[in-house]
Amino acid sequence: MRDSYGREINYLRVSITDRCNLRCRYCMPEEGIKKIDHYDILSLEEIARLIKIASSLGIRKVRLTGGEPLIRKNIVQMVSDIAGLSGIDDLALTTNGILFPDMAEELKQAGLNRVNFSMDTMVGEKFKYITRGGNLEKVSGAVFQALELGMEPVKINTVVIKGFNDSEILDFAALAYKYPLHIRFIEFMPIGDLLFWNQEKLMSVDEIKKKIEQEYELYEGSKIEGNGPAKYYHMQGGMGTIGFISPMSNHFCGSCNRIRMTADGSLRGCLYENAEVNLKSALLSGASDQDLKNLFIKTIINKAPRHQMNSGWGSENERKMYQIGG
Ligand code: SAM
Ligand code: SF4
């Protein structure tokens, strides 16, 4: 279905939990989060039903995210249920990777096509610092396990934070050169734990790209599955690609194809806009499939033309990224 600005909306990002087993400094407060009551979270069955309804409106791609999606009980069953829906032809997952090694094969068998891992540094101590305790070896092991299992593409999300990991940009590029990995450099957004964000820590994708071009020749080549807001480049002689996501310096709203569902069952047209419709309360009051479909239509029709994150995002009352689904 097209929104009011003619954009084809075919991608649903689903946050299946707002809880996490890490506490990345830019995302969550150290003490964790106020937990949503178990009964307020969408159940497995509700998620599958809502995705099926969304698929009747042209949603073809689904990404499970969070919080950390792999801490959700019965995640393998959820993957299997969604992968089995006839309208959905692309199912992906964004994860911190910590629990991935224990369930990788089951996830693959359940129908998971591809995975994005988040990894901001390749130095164990720095990883421990930024995630407040995470084990880098587990995540790097998970990345290579996904490659071995033939998941394709395997992507790595790296939020670039000046003074923290900008010194590793070429190391990440080298990783994409050596392995069929797709490294996506993401501009640091003022959307998580705002105590950690400041303008000086922001590095634009132009700066990042210039740094990589000192060492590698980049060229635009064939598209990578799941081409969302990232702009991808191949490297002369390299196995993988480099992607750049520039929500801050160059928003990509004109080609946005997505809507988002939160773990507590709200539907949002945009990560950065607060407007939501409440699917959970509709479900609780016995809404029919058509009623729910109308709520999806309303969200798509009302989707904002672009985000305004550069001018005023950040009030503490807004939902955070881990609540909406990063
Ligand atoms: N827990 C999973 C993970 O870390 O991959 C999924 C959820 S996480 C919120 C999704 C993505 O959002 C991660 O790649 C994370 O680095 C990114 N993210 C979180 N806060 C961010 C921020 N302030 N700026 C840019 N990216 C951010
Ligand atoms: Fe958890 Fe992902 Fe947020 Fe890190 S970025 S705290 S892993 S939800």
Image (cartoon, grey):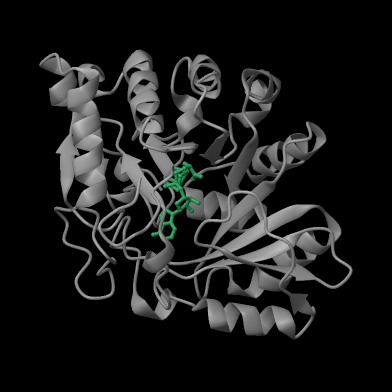
Which residue does the image show at 42% across and 78% down from the upper left?
Answer: 249
Where does the image place residue 205, in percent across and percent down from the top left?
54, 76
Q: Measured along the vertical axis of the image, is residue 204 above or below residue 42? A: below
Q: Nearer the viewer, residue 91 or 314?
A: 91
Which residue does the image show at 52% across and 56% down from the upper left?
Answer: 228
Residue 110 shows up from this direction = yes
Where does the image place residue 8, in percent across and percent down from the top left?
40, 52
Tell whether 289 sits left or right of 67: left
Where does the image place residue 285, in percent across and percent down from the top left?
10, 16
Where does the image place residue 273, in percent across and percent down from the top left?
22, 57
The image quarter in which residue 298 lies? top left
**Residue at the outermost right position:** 237
**Residue at the outermost left position:** 285
- Is the N terminus in the top left, top right, bottom left or bottom right quadrant? top left
Q: Measured along the vertical axis of the image, is residue 42 above or below residue 146? A: above
Residue 34 shows up from this direction = no
Which residue does the image show at 21% across and 16% down from the upper left?
Answer: 39
Tell whether 138 sits left or right of 81: right
The image quarter in which residue 214 lies? bottom right
Q: Measured along the vertical axis of the image, is residue 21 above or below residue 78? A: below
Q: Nearer the viewer, residue 126 or 67?
A: 67
Q: Measured along the vertical axis of the image, is residue 147 above or below residue 49? A: below
Tell whether 87 sits left or right of 173: left
